[in-house]
Image: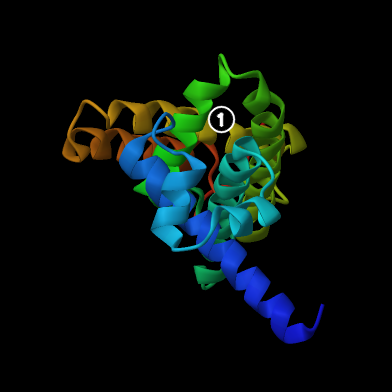
Amino acid sequence: MTRARQTRAEETRRRILGATVEVLHDAGFAGTSTQAVCRRVGCSRGTLLYHFPTREDLLVSALHHLLASRVEQFVASATGPMEPDAFVLALWDQWKDEAFTAWLELAVAARTHDGLQAPLQETMQVFDRMIVDAFRQLVPHDHLPEEVVASLPQLLFAVFNGLAVSRSYERQEAVDPHVALIARFAGAVVPGPIGGTPWKS
C-alpha cells in the first residue's frame, strides 16, 4: 500500500469511528447498525467491513478511539504540574457529551451481549491504565504511597461513572456541586507538594 493510500485509509477509518460515536449518541446501541454508520459517513458497507469485519469490532473500536483521544488531549492540554483538585475537575470534563453516552450504551449492552463483554472489558482496562498514567504524569506523587497512586484514578473513574449516569435524569447543575466537593476532598486527602502538605500514613 502506498503512503497516499495508507493516509486515505487511516482518514476513512477515523471518519467511520467518529460517525459510529455520533450514531451511538443519537440512536443508542439498538439503533447503531452498520448501515446507519455508512449513511452517516457516506461510505459503502464494503468499505466499512474492510476496516471493521463485525459490528462488535466497530462499536468497541469507536469507544476505544474516543476514550484514548480524550485522555491524550487531556494530557496534552496540561501546562504543568496539577494539584489533585485541579486534576479531578479537568478529568470530569472528559465524562461529558458523546464520550460518556457511547460508554454507557455499550456498558449496558455488554451485560447480555457475549460478543461485547470481552473486548469492552479489554478497552476499559486500557482506559484505566491511561488514567493512571495521566495522574502519574500530571500530579506530583513522589510523596504518595504507591497504593494511592495506583488506586485513586480508578476510584475517581467509578465515582464519575455514577455521577455521569445521574445526568440522564438530573440537570447538569445538580451534579456540578458533587464534582466540586470531590475535588475538595481530593485536595484535602491527597495534598500535593505544590501547595499542600506531604502525605502522612
Question: Horizontally, is 34 left or right of 132 in the view?
Answer: left
Work out whether 107 lies above or below 27. Answer: above
**Element at label 1:** helix
Question: Horizontally, is 133 left or right of 90 in the view?
Answer: right
Q: Is residue 98 visible?
A: yes
| Occupied quadrant, residue 194 | bottom right
Work out whether 33 lies above or below 71. Answer: above
Residue at 26% x, 40% y: name it. Answer: 176
Q: Amino acid at mark 1?
A: Leu
Disc tally is 1
Q: Is residue 200 visible?
A: no
Residue at 66% x, 71% y: name it. Answer: 9
The residue that disc 1 covers is 155
Q: Position of residue 172 (x, y in %)?
A: 21, 39
Q: Position of residue 72 (x, y in %)?
A: 59, 62
The C terminus: image quadrant:
top right
The N terminus: image quadrant:
bottom right
Residue at 39% x, 46% y: name it. Answer: 23
Q: Position of residue 198 (x, y in %)?
A: 62, 46
Work out whether 6 lies above or below 81. Answer: below
| Occupied quadrant, residue 102 | top left
